[in-house]
Image (tube, rainbow, N blue to C red):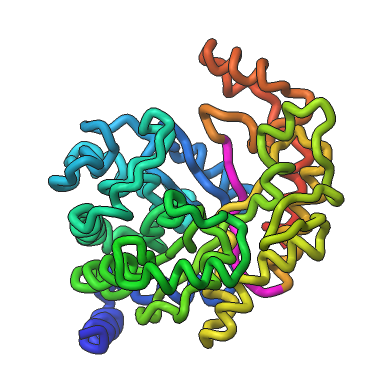
Amino acid sequence: MLQKFRSAVLCLALAGAMPQAASAADLMTFWDTPQRGGNSFNASEPDKAYFDALAATGATWVRLTFSKWKGEGRDTLLGDADHYKGLPPKDLARLRETLDAAHAAGLKVVLTPLSLPGARWKQQNDGAFDDRLWSDRAFADQAVEFWSDLATALKDHPAVAGYNLINEPAPEKTTGLAENGTMADIRAWQEKNSGGPRDLPKLYTRIIKAIRKVDPVTPVMVDGGYYANPRALAAWPKRLADDKVLYAFHMYEPYNATSAPNMKRETPLRYPGATTNYAGGTMTWDRNAVADHINTAFDWAKTQGLPPTRVVAAEFGCMRLWADCGTYLTDVMDAVEAKGGHWAFYSFREDEWEGMDYELSAKVKPGQFYWLKEQGKAASLPRDGALMDLLKTRMQK
């Protein structure tokens, strides 16, 4: 079927009648060279001005979630994560308009839901982790149906360069496995749960099979387990069968230092030098430790015969007011680029949280951001932050 599709595309191209879908045939080649981008996790749909601003940084792609937007039902584009019954038409139309704006700005988009049926995002679930997808096979069936519907609807859109099937899945969370435990424990957990509802590679395989029935060419991006931890990915016994898959991890380790709670300490943890529990012992974090953690994903990919351009640091970041954020961002980018992978910083102009908005200078305090936002004057915030200059330098080189 795929060979027939390629032949048809070639004939149309020679005839000068190339359809929009033909661009999708070459989408995997977009990922054959390292790409740099940002994450868009906004509560409202980004407009063309937003995407133009992101493209002006040197970004070539954006990882876009729609799950925070106000939808027709409780859960945008799902309708209701308690029972998926089809794509709400108005939600889909708004997503298409947003994709049009990204395309007009010259950006490729990776679509990324924060929720799937039976796995509602914690922040939209009264703060409770939703484990149903990982314990009830009926929700896996609905997740497959949702992605089949979405791929059918958007397979021809020229902006779409990937389907990121679910953001930060954590089938391990309620089972007692330590998030950064020993690799022996992580592998044993994966083996024990193979074939069951918590088997993440199995779920991905089912979803991809359904997508390929309607869309044989658009790349798929898959996060490793335990919130896209590269060590959880490295516990998979083998790569997925589909040859158009990108394997993603997120990088916030050491989380105790990079995250918001650290900023509330009387004396925040510093980098390099912070020590955390890790792999059954402790880790003192510096650029070598950061690289070792990141390399877990690249080393696994190499054993699977995958090139480094099939690995994506799909999120990384730190609190912008943390004294060591610039040093940390540099070390993460150095590690990923040394291996030849892709990256996307978190995040670009998030409209309801300023913590990782690197365009804002250190002079802009959180209270000022939220006050101006409430007054409808967020556009007046000065956007001359040195951290964004650091990111721009890497994206534009």
Q: Nearer the viewer, residue 380 or 279?
A: 279
Q: Residue at x 53, y 47 (%)?
A: 39
Q: Indicate the position of residue 313 as horizontal and vertical percent values.
A: 59, 61
Q: Indicate the position of residue 298 as horizontal and vertical percent values.
A: 62, 74
Q: Residue at x 63, y 78 (%)?
A: 299
Give the farthest residue toward the left. Answer: 85
Q: Indicate the position of residue 123 as horizontal and vertical percent values.
A: 43, 33
Left or right of 44 on screen, residue 187: right
- The answer to whether residue 153 of the structure is visible from this angle is no
Q: How many marks?
A: 0
Q: Nearer the viewer, residue 224 or 173?
A: 173
Instruction: Report the magenta residues as a range.
Output: 339-349
Q: Is residue 347 magenta?
A: yes
Q: Is residue 376 magenta?
A: no
Q: Nearer the viewer, residue 291 or 331?
A: 291
Above-or-below relation of 355 to 25: above
Q: Residue at x 49, y 71 (%)?
A: 188
Left or right of 243 on screen, residue 234: right
Above-or-below relation of 224 to 85: below
Quadrant containing the C terminus is bottom right
Q: Nearer the viewer, residue 50 or 279?
A: 279
Quadrant containing the N terminus is bottom left
- The answer to whether residue 363 of the structure is visible from this angle is yes
Q: Indicate the position of residue 212 as horizontal and vertical percent values.
A: 25, 73
Residue 357, image quadrant: top right
Left or right of 76 on screen, residue 291: right
Q: Residue at x 19, y 72 (%)?
A: 213
